Image (cartoon, rainbow, N blue to C red):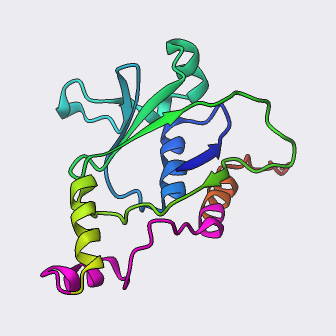
Amino acid sequence: MRRLDVPLNIRLDRLHEALQAALGWSNSHLYELVFKGVGFGIPDDGWGDGPMDARKAKLIDIIEDTGAKSFKYLYDFGDGWEHSIKIEKIMPAIDGVSYPCLIEASGACPPEDSGGPWGFMEARQALADPNHERHQEIREWWGIETYDPAAVDIPAIEASLEKLAKRWAPRRRTPK
């Protein structure tokens, strides 16, 4: 579980990046944010009625247009990760706070490319059993000895979100 505070005027492609940072993933797959049946992601002219361009949509506009209080976040269509996102409340920004920021986090997220929910569960079983035929393969693939589902690296999430906040901060213009 991750709870984030993001600005209402955040572009949806940036919201995706904030979610990636909060989950500890590498932003290496396609994604889609789906609000009441309308999807936003990376458009592909050859895909027919694929998602609308997430770079051209802001969260506030989508909320106002659809009245959505929740939406789906789909990531890595091959693995099939689907997250339910709830908009808890809308509040004014707090002066001096960098957005996006982490409010709360619990539990470890699955490693990138872990095979989706089913592959992830199989890999966890293999990692937990030294006699499992895939035990060594999963240890090497994930780069860990054991997997702790309760572990969460809050400082790493906060650092990743702070890096995004700095990258997205308005630049001061210097007079010519």
Q: Quadrant of residue 122?
A: bottom left
Q: Residue furthest left?
A: 133
Residue 97, placed above or below residue 141? above
- Judged left or right of residue 104, residue 68 is left
Residue shown at 22%/55% (left/top)? 118
Residue 51's x, y, as percent? Answer: 32, 30
Tell me, yes or no, whether the highlighted magenta stretch contains residue 134. yes
- Judged left or right of residue 74, residue 165 is right
Residue shown at 28%/63% (left/top)? 113
- Judged left or right of residue 156, residue 95 is right
Q: Which residues are magenta?
A: 131-159
Residue 173, placed above or below residue 166? above
Residue 124, placed above or below residue 161? below
Residue 75's x, y, as percent? Answer: 34, 47
Residue 131, placed above or below residue 73? below
Tell me, yes or no, whether the highlighted magenta stretch contains residue 23. no
18 or 148: nearer the viewer? 148
Residue 155's x, y, as percent? Answer: 65, 69
Residue shown at 48%/45% (left/top)? 16
Residue shown at 79%/30% (left/top)? 92
